[in-house]
Amino acid sequence: MIDLYTWGTPNGRKVSIMLEATGLPYRVHPINILADDQFKPDFLRISPNNKVPAITDEDGPNGQQIQLFESGAILIYLAEKTGNFMPTDPLKRIECLQWLMWQMGGFGPMLGQAHHFNRFAKEAVPYAQQRYNEEARRLWGVLDKHLSGRTFILDQDLSIADFAIYPWTCRYQWQTIELDDFPNVSAWMAKMGKIEFVQRGMSIP
């Protein structure tokens, strides 16, 4: 049994989508980040960086219990555990990891900054808003160009790269993004949004 510690954030929903996609049995433990649950000692023992999501797996490598934080690491672990949603072909595998790292290193952090300064900062900081909104548009442009003529991030193969990127695109309004400006991303989002396990994953917790 896997225990998922999460909240309704894009990073949290990457993992709930993956768990729904694989059919692995799991329990959800909501970590209310608005109430500072992420700083409680019990959670910090699992996620010392005080961020969601995190998991524990009673049936980890060599039958030993494992605990993991960092959403990208969790996606790779679950893909390797199940043999699903990450290619075994070396070239395809590295392409998958490339786009996962793109999300982890840029698309998530930069869009997260746009969310903060557009919605949560106690006072408007025009310089920061302009900086992160422009970077959001640039990153959306990279994704839109990549998705031209493709069904998914790896063309025809649905992968953890899709699961990592999709929840962040769903908050496009927080990034002042107009979907009409990025038709390839918009079409991909529509496909992703129709997948039943994606819908279930996006509703957790």
Image (spheres, rainbow, N blue to C red):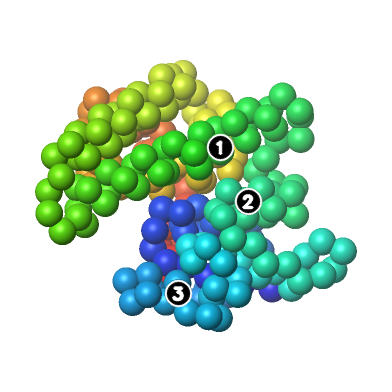
Q: What's the amino acid at mark 1?
A: Met
Q: What residue does disc 2 label?
A: 73
Q: Locate residue 70: give its quadrant.
A: bottom right
Q: Which of marks 3 and 1 is nearer the N terminus?
A: 3
Q: How crowded is mark 3: few (under 14 residues within 10 Å), some or many (20 or more)?
A: some
CA–CA distance in space, label 2 to label 3:
21 Å
Q: Locate residue 67: give its quadrant.
A: bottom right
Which is closer to the viewer, label 3 or label 1? 3
Mark number displayed over residue 101 = 1
Q: Which of marks 2 and 1 is nearer the N terminus?
A: 2
Mark number displayed over residue 39 = 3
| SS for dot 2 | helix
Residue drawn where x is 20% and y is 40% of the image: 129
CA–CA distance in space, label 2 to label 1:
10 Å
Q: Is residue 104 visible?
A: yes
Q: Locate residue 155: give its quadrant.
A: top right
